[in-house]
């Protein structure tokens, strides 16, 4: 008989805080639905009081998620807790997660209060949250640097006030595994009412200990792990969901616990989060890195040929990584495309089949044969496009030689009106194209990040361009995909500009509402 460890995913809250550009509501919902299929027990999807945009995204996700509990973060402040409830109340099941710092450094330097006052604030916050729901989580921020007596005191008080989960976070990644495990063990043994709450852990990876600390905590009685897909998060990141889940699965005889995660969804969700968040996965990343199942050593290859278990403790199929199939061409119909998407784990709700099929035909005409990873890349791009794009790339031509400056001709459609211009100069064809697009739109944009990656292999691989641009103090992410890198670069800028236009539209709506009020 095994205990179950609750998997609390905070990709859309703690993870999103570390991104170069904020996600759209559509992108957040896409990730939330993927997390639901993955089987996370709880997903923390935002900090509603922080902005109207965050409030609306939490509310949208709460309305759509049915099989996971939706959580929102709040400080130990009345308005935060009230905002969290207002955003979450449309959910079938929700949790309010409230926190306050407990370490002497935070209490004295940041909060400028006594510890007694902090305990009072924690109790008041939990009680207020309990007015809205019987599922309340309390976190004592920076517990890793808090004296054990104070941790036990504030945890006991929070449970008495009604907290059903108590989180002991290593907020700055300070602890070593034996040290952190001892903290959890003491909380479990010294807090008299601990049997009324689940002990949770939230570890950061500043010293590379997040996974080890979380697993050691489980061995000492913790039964909830807070984590993110691919370990994204503040600074060096959070505990990686895929690492703790697979460690528990592979070494179940050691841990004696289990999770309800559908591990065959791990690879797909990992790729989705990487794509939508513009956070590339390092090749040697455990579980989900591109080299995680690669074997280049002669000795390793020989062993693998004789018995896969010689150098693989898990199979690629365990995390949903399947061999690529090559049998899609321009003659393949919608049913074949839909079938390949289903084989990769996608449901009809994940993508627009008509849009995907049109993009597939255009790519098939250029490449001849289309791989599953091409199809998946096209689907990811569709996920990031807006429902109403004001700007569309119509025509593009760029030329560059060693002797002469690069030139570009660009034709766009802006709100249905065709605009065109030519541009000469710049540092190359991409620069010339960008100059032409910015001339036509008249926007003041500064490029802060440009990244080109190949999707697939060989001369006909798709080129994906990810950019981050700055406009009026905000950062916007753009992504483009094409067999030609100049075209993919242009599409990335057009995508970013459409995001800017949508931000302008939201700002105008808020302004009119404010004036009307």
Image (tube, grey):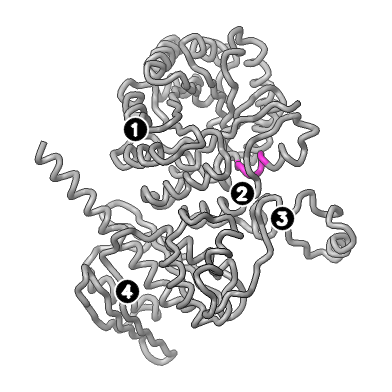
The earlier-in-sequence mark between 2 and 4 is: 2
> Which residue appears farthest toward the top when viewing the image?
192
The earlier-in-sequence mark between 1 and 4 is: 1
Crowd tier of the residue under label 3, counting other residues whose Cα lies within 10 Å: few below 14, some 14–19, many 20 or above: some
Span colored in magenta: 240-245
- How much space separates mark 1 and mark 3, taking CA atoms? 39 Å
Callouts 2 and 3 close, C-beta under 8 Å: no
Q: Which mark is residue 266?
A: 2
Query: Percent position (x, y) of residue 86?
Result: 32, 29
Q: Which mark is residue 87?
A: 1
The earlier-in-sequence mark between 1 and 3 is: 1
Question: Which residue is tagged 4?
Answer: 393
Q: Which one is in front, 189 or 456?
A: 456
- How much space separates mark 2 and mark 1, taking CA atoms? 28 Å
Could you tell me which residue is drawn at 57 percent across and 13 percent down? Answer: 196
Could you tell me which residue is drawn at 27 percent across and 70 percent down? Answer: 438
91 shown above or below 143: below
Q: Looking at the figure, which quarter contains the C terminus?
A: top left
Could you tell me which residue is drawn at 32 percent across and 32 percent down? Answer: 49
Query: Percent position (x, y) of residue 299?
Result: 87, 62
- How much space separates mark 2 and mark 3, taking CA atoms? 11 Å
The answer to which quarter of the image holds residue 325 is bottom right
Residue 278 lies in the magenta stretch: no
The answer to which quarter of the image holds residue 260 is top right
Could you tell whether 114 is left or right of 221 in the image?
left
Question: Which residue is tagged 3?
Answer: 316
Could you tell whether 146 is left or right of 433 in the image?
right
Callouts 1 and 3 close, C-beta under 8 Å: no
Q: Secondary structure at mark 4?
A: strand
């Amino acid at each position: 008989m095994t205990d179950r460890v609750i998997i609390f995913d905070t990709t859309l809250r703690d993870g999103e805080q570390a991104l170069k550009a904020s996600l759209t509501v559509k992108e957040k919902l896409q990730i939330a639905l993927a997390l639901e299929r993955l089987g996370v027990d709880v997903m923390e999807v935002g900090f509603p009081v922080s902005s109207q945009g965050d409030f609306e995204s939490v509310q949208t996700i709460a309305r759509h998620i049915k099989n996971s509990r939706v959580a929102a973060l709040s400080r130990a402040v009345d308005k935060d807790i009230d905002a969290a409830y207002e955003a979450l109340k449309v959910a079938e099941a929700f949790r309010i997660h409230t926190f306050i710092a407990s370490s002497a450094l935070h209490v004295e330097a940041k909060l400028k209060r006594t510890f007694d006052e902090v305990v009072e604030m924690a109790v008041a916050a939990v009680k207020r949250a309990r007015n809205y729901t019987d599922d309340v989580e309390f976190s004592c921020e920076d517990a890793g640097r808090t004296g054990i007596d104070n941790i036990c005191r504030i945890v006991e008080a929070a449970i008495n006030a009604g907290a059903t989960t108590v989180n002991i976070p290593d907020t700055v990644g300070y602890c070593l595994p034996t040290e952190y495990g001892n903290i959890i063990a003491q909380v479990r043994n010294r807090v008299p009412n601990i049997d009324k709450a689940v002990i949770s852990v939230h570890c950061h990876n500043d010293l590379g200990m997040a996974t080890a600390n979380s697993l050691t905590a489980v061995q000492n009685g913790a039964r909830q792990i807070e984590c993110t897909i691919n370990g994204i998060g503040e600074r060096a990141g959070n505990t990686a969901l895929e690492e703790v889940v697979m460690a528990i699965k592979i070494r179940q005889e050691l841990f004696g616990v289990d999770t309800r995660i559908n591990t065959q969804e791990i690879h797909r969700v990992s790729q989705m989060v990487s794509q939508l968040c513009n956070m590339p996965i390092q090749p040697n990343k455990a579980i989900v890195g591109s080299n995680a199942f690669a074997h280049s050593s002669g000795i390793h290859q020989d062993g693998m040929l004789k018995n896969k278990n010689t150098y693989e403790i898990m199979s690629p199929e365990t995390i949903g990584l399947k061999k690529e199939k090559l049998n899609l061409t321009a003659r393949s119909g919608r049913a074949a495309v839909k079938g390949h998407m289903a084989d990769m784990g996608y449901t009809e709700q994940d993508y627009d089949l008509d849009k995907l099929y049109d993009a597939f035909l255009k790519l098939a005409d250029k490449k001849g044969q289309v791989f599953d990873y091409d199809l998946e890349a096209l689907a990811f791009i569709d996920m990031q496009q807006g429902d109403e794009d004001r700007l569309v790339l119509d025509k593009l031509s760029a030329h560059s030689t060693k002797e002469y400056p690069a030139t570009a001709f660009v034709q766009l459609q802006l709100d249905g009106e065709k605009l065109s211009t030519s541009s000469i100069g710049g540092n190359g064809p991409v620069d010339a194209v960008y100059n032409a697009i910015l001339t036509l739109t008249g926007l003041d944009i500064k490029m802060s990040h440009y990244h080109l990656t190949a999707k697939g292999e060989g001369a006909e691989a798709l080129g994906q361009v990810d950019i981050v641009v700055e406009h009026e103090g905000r950062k916007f992410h753009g992504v483009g995909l094409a067999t030609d890198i100049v075209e993919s670069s242009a599409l990335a800028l057009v995508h970013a500009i459409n995001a800017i236009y949508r931000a302008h539209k939201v700002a105008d709506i808020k302004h009119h509402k404010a004036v009307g009020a």
